[in-house]
Image: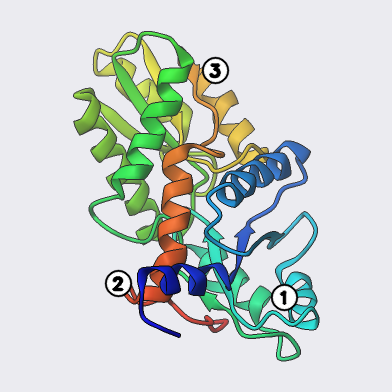
Amino acid sequence: MTETPHGQIAELAASTLLLVAHGSIDPEAQESTRALAHAVVLSRTASRVEVAYLRHARPRARQVLRTLAEAGHDRVVVVPLLLTSAFHARVDLPRALGDPSALVPVVTPVLGAPSSTPDRRLVAALRRRLAELDVAFDAVVVAAAGSSDTEACSSVTAMASALGADLRLPCLAGFASTASPTTGEAVTQLRHAGARRVAVASCCLAPGLLFRRAVDSATAAGAVGVSEPLGDAPELVGLVLERFHEAHDGRTPPEGPPRPE
């Protein structure tokens, strides 16, 4: 293939993009993931965009990879719709993709790859959803699912620090499960420190059990509002597309087919 801008675009378009989300028993979660996929489709970056799930929903990633292989697709880029490199990224994802009868995909880093400096687009997406609340606030809690993985929790704390710096307001991380503080405890801490109107920025990709738990905990502690999950926020779409391009042009080496631990 001739190395021209047009040729590069054609090469990208020849690849299939598979978005792999965690999955939920909540139908709204699947609707949110499909909305994100639709926004990616509109970019016309990939020839085909598919969605699969790790748990609780269908289709599963292994099933989609088999279907694509049978249809003759030999280039598939997997973008994990995960915000931290915790258990689901380290264990569930490799197991879901480890099928010797299917094609071997290229797997990009998760959207919230570990870093002391979070991607500015994720911070901007949190701000977008907060603005949609249309309420006044003087402090913020960034609410995430939670994990026993210290590095994953640290990445959420870094996200809270970055958002607080952007807003020039006190901002803490709170978790729906496993880690501490809970979203309610984080709201209470900020109120004890003098904040009067604490809002919660949902650092979740889609609604589900843990999102509802974070909402309930924060509301009980007196939060003035909880933003919606990131869903199909334009900043998130841009991050997905960048991960897709990185798998081709080598700006950031893809993780490759991960191995189960």
Place of residue 13 in the rendered image (x, y in percent of width and height, measured from the top left): 55, 67
**Residue 96 visible within the image:** yes
Q: Residues within 10 Å of mark 3 (few under 14, many from 20)?
A: few
2 or 1: tag closer to the N-terminus: 1
Name the residue furthest bottom: 100
In front: 44, or 148?
Answer: 44
Asked if the residues shown at circle 2 and circle 1 are in contact, with their CB atoms under 8 angstroms apart, the answer is no
The secondary structure type at the circle numbered 2 is loop
Q: Which mark is residue 137?
A: none
Residue 58, picture quadrant: bottom right
Measure the alpha-carbon separation of dots 2 and 3. Answer: 45 Å
**Residue 247 visible within the image:** no
1 or 3: tag closer to the N-terminus: 1
The secondary structure type at the circle numbered 3 is helix
- Residue kind at label 2, given as amino acid type: Arg
Which residue is depicted at the point 69% across and 52% down?
23
In front: 205, or 187?
Answer: 205
Identify residue for label 3.
220
Place of residue 39 in the rendered image (x, y in percent of width and height, measured from the top left): 58, 44
Q: Is residue 121 above or below residue 196?
A: below
2 or 3: tag closer to the N-terminus: 3
Q: Nearer the viewer, mark 1 or mark 3?
A: 1
- Residue kind at label 1, given as amino acid type: Leu
Identify residue for label 1.
65
